[in-house]
Image (cartoon, rainbow, N blue to C red):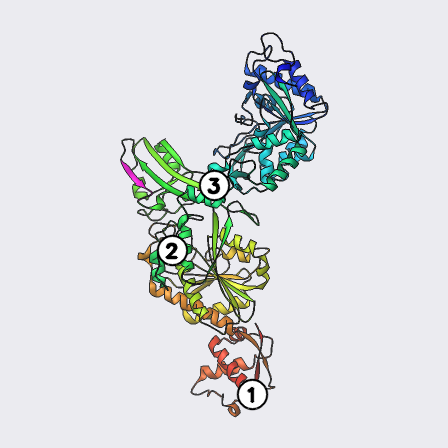
């Protein structure tokens, strides 16, 4: 029907109830239908007998309700974007906001307030509905705004229809659901956290929203899809008032859009098609370059060259440090994109901070990101405004133990803004109001994991790991990284390794999860590992056992520790420090993983060390001598692990030691005599050397020496690897 042949309206109005009903019938809306309705009242013009927004909302809803009848169900977008706006969401009270999807907010608000109306708990894309199918479509939704089993997926599978009153099909939110399911390259999943209020109680939740990259090329442009839908007969329209109303079957529109996006993933974006990473890098100042390090840099040079970099979880500073390390030893740098799902984790965005400061209202600068990167919470949201002292202090963090230090605070997944300063400086903040400026940015990027592989005779693998993140800090955990690089160099010189070694340089926790999730086939070959962290302080070594506590790798590493550091101490799993060893010991992985550090016991008031997570964690607190001792200890741990076997006896009874020249005189070498016979009597093919040493109470080197001597005379077979 052409616009020249519009259905008749009441005098003085552009359209009336009968016009709407006739139009709805013309676009195929009838009794029993399930419809998802968007509305833009302004484009339709003046309505008959309507004097305010409430009356117009009533007219629109009543017309749709009459068209679908009592057996039909009407859904409307009551979107709030609450979690995106850092606001709590109350399904019963939070009002819908207007947008391109529904410019007339009075319409969804009218539906939401109707008796018997049901509203979904989605704190971003909530939907309200009335009718016999509303409950099944809006209840029990998973916390995913646009994915499988979302409202839009249920609408499609239930044979629903999309109805647009004065809105083009290109503005239907359903399109973004199709883009999400088709995994277009310019969109990615992002976790939004916040609080949902229900029945007087609040609960923290996280919801996934498939957002687009911030580059202009990814701006929405559904015009081509709408033209295609018109050409293919998927889009049906009828003129009403000054504009038209439109409908499409959800399944038909899904199939059309999915086919178009399969052929051209940028079909519903402004374009042109580009590499999303390149677009985001260009928007944020180009790709990272390696930080300068000399060839074959020493541990001290690695620390000196990298410690000042703002090595936030996914950031340019982290990338610069990783590229620099990749130039020191042969390394594969794995890249995992923002929004990727790795087991239960969603990989975070890249974060950057261009500028941030706190100043008085007369412009006196008190501190800034330029003074020290720790003055801003890592992954802080951008914020600019004048705040009261009370509000400022809610967002201003200080170190709990060191009055003069700036703390390291991060909010990777809690969406909030924040600043940090010393306790001393906070006490000087007495003005009633202050100006806060945080110019931070989030963008699509890749989380990076460095992997060094040193092959051995077998594919059985030992993993060493350390984390490279934490901006402008050294002991946690640039010291672990430096030790790992030096250990890798030493292992690469060996040609007799039994095990294959994989050394991982990761962003803490999520980096290890990403690596394991993408290398599941390697997990069964992993025999154990060691996390290296906080190794630069002048404290005795602390070895944290694996979850299992009594494995061969636990015993080997404990023997090396007792041998090299008599003051060292051993703690049970998670009783020393907690880090990425948790990911290896976790369910579904179950690789016995220990951690080596130089931390104070948990009951010490300065645990893990006084300068932890502060601006005082800098090169001045390090002991290079201790760092070198830690490297040598790790190498000794691996040496014992390599030497450990389960020897089998080829003799019976007590060996006539003098015959083979291996006797140790009790009068002149009592410890050697005890070690010889205590070891000998336990060689029966059931114990490894380290188990024999522990059981006999002798040093591993003495037990190994005895086995080696006896093997040289054919008295013992080396047996199987332990």
In this view, 708 is above or below 391? below
Residue 24: name its quadrant.
top right
For the record, the magenta segment spans: 364-370
Instruction: Give the farthest residue toward the top.
Output: 11
- Is 305 on the left or on the right of 459, as rendered? left
What label does residue 553 carry, if any?
none
Callout 3 secondary element = loop
For label 3, the residue is 414
Q: Quadrant of residue 475?
A: bottom left
> In the image, is residue 195 above or below residue 93?
below
User: Residue tagged by mark 2?
Assistant: 609
Determine contact: label 1, label 2, CB under 8 Å.
no
In percent of width and height, residue 640 lies at 49, 72
**Can residue 607 be seen in the rendering of this structure?**
no
Local SS, label 1 = loop
Q: Earlier in the sequence, mark 2 or mark 3?
A: 3
- Tell me the distance, in whole angstroms, between the alpha carbons under discs 3 and 1: 68 Å
Residue at position x 37%, y 31% from top? 385
Q: Which badge, 1 or 2, comes first in the chain's sequence?
A: 2
Asked if residue 117 is positioned above or below residue 424 in the image, the reply reads above
Residue 369 lies in magenta, yes or no? yes
Across and down, in percent, residue 357 comes to 33, 38
């Amino acid at each position: 029907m052409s616009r020249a042949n519009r259905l008749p309206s009441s005098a003085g109005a552009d359209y009336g109830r009968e016009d709407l009903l006739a139009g709805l019938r013309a676009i195929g809306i009838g009794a029993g239908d399930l419809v998802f309705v968007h509305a833009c009242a302004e484009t339709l013009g003046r309505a008959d007998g309507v004097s305010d927004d409430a009356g117009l909302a009533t007219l629109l809803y009543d017309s749709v309700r009459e068209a679908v009848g009592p057996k039909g169900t009407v859904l409307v977008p009551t979107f709030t974007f609450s979690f995106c706006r850092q606001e709590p969401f109350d399904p019963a009270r939070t009002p819908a906001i207007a947008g391109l999807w529904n410019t007339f907010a009075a319409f969804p608000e009218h539906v939401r307030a109707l008796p018997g109306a049901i509203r979904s708990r989605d704190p971003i894309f909530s939907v309200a509905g009335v009718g016999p199918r509303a409950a099944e479509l809006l209840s029990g939704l998973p916390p995913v705004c646009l994915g499988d089993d979302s409202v839009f997926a249920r609408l499609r599978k239930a044979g629903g229809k999309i109805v647009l009153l004065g809105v083009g099909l290109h503005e239907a939110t359903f399109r973004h659901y199709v883009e999400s399911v088709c995994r277009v390259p310019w969109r990615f999943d992002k976790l939004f956290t916040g609080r949902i209020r229900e029945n007087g109680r609040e609960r923290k939740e996280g919801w996934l929203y498939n957002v687009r990259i911030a580059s202009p090329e990814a701006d929405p442009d559904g015009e081509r899809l709408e033209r295609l839908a018109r050409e293919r007969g998927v889009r049906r329209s009828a003129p009403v008032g000054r504009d038209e109303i439109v409908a499409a079957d959800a399944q038909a529109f899904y199939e059309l859009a999915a086919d178009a996006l399969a052929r051209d993933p940028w079909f519903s974006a402004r374009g042109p098609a580009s590499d999303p990473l390149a677009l985001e890098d260009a928007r944020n100042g180009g790709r990272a370059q390696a930080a300068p390090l000399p060839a074959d840099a020493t541990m001290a040079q690695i620390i000196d060259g990298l410690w000042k970099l703002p090595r936030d979880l996914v950031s340019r500073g982290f990338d610069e440090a990783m590229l620099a390390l990749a130039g020191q030893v042969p390394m594969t740098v794995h890249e995992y994109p923002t929004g990727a799902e790795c087991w239960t984790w969603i990989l975070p965005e890249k974060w950057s901070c261009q500028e941030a400061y706190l100043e008085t209202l007369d412009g006196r600068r008190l501190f800034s990101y330029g003074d020290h990167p720790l003055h801003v919470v890592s992954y802080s949201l951008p914020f600019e405004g004048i705040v009261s002292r009370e509000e400022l202090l809610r967002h201003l963090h200080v170190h709990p133990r060191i009055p003069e230090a700036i703390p390291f605070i991060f909010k990777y997944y809690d969406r909030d803004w924040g600043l940090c300063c010393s306790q001393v400086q906070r006490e000087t903040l007495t003005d009633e109001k202050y100006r806060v400026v945080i110019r931070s940015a989030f963008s699509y990027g890749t989380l990076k994991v460095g992997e060094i592989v040193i092959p051995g005779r077998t594919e059985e693998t030992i993993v060493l790991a350390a984390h490279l993140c934490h901006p402008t800090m050294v002991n946690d955990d640039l010291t672990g990284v430096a030790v790992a690089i030096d250990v890798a160099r030493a292992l690469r010189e060996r040609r007799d390794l039994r095990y294959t070694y994989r050394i991982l340089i990761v962003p803490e926790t999520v980096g290890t999860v990403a690596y394991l999730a993408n290398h599941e086939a390697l997990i069964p070959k992993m025999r154990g590992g060691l996390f290296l962290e906080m190794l630069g302080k002048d404290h005795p070594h602390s070895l944290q056992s694996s979850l299992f506590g009594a494995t061969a790798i636990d015993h080997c590493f404990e023997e090396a520790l007792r041998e090299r550091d008599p003051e060292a101490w051993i703690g049970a799993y998670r009783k020393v420090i907690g880090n990425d060893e948790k990911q290896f010991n976790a369910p579904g992985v179950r690789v016995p993983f220990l951690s080596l550090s130089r931390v104070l016991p948990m009951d010490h008031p300065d645990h893990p060390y006084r300068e932890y997570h502060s601006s005082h964690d800098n090169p001045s607190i390090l002991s290079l001598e201790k760092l070198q001792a830690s490297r040598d200890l790790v190498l000794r741990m691996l040496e014992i692990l390599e030497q450990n076997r389960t020897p089998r006896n080829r003799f019976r009874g007590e060996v006539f030691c003098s015959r083979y020249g291996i006797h140790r005189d009790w009068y002149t070498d009592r410890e050697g005599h005890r070690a010889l016979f205590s070891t000998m009597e336990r060689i029966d093919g059931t114990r490894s050397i380290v188990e024999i040493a522990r059981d006999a109470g002798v040093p591993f080197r003495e037990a190994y020496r005895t086995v080696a001597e006896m093997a040289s005379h054919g008295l013992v077979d080396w047996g199987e690897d332990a």
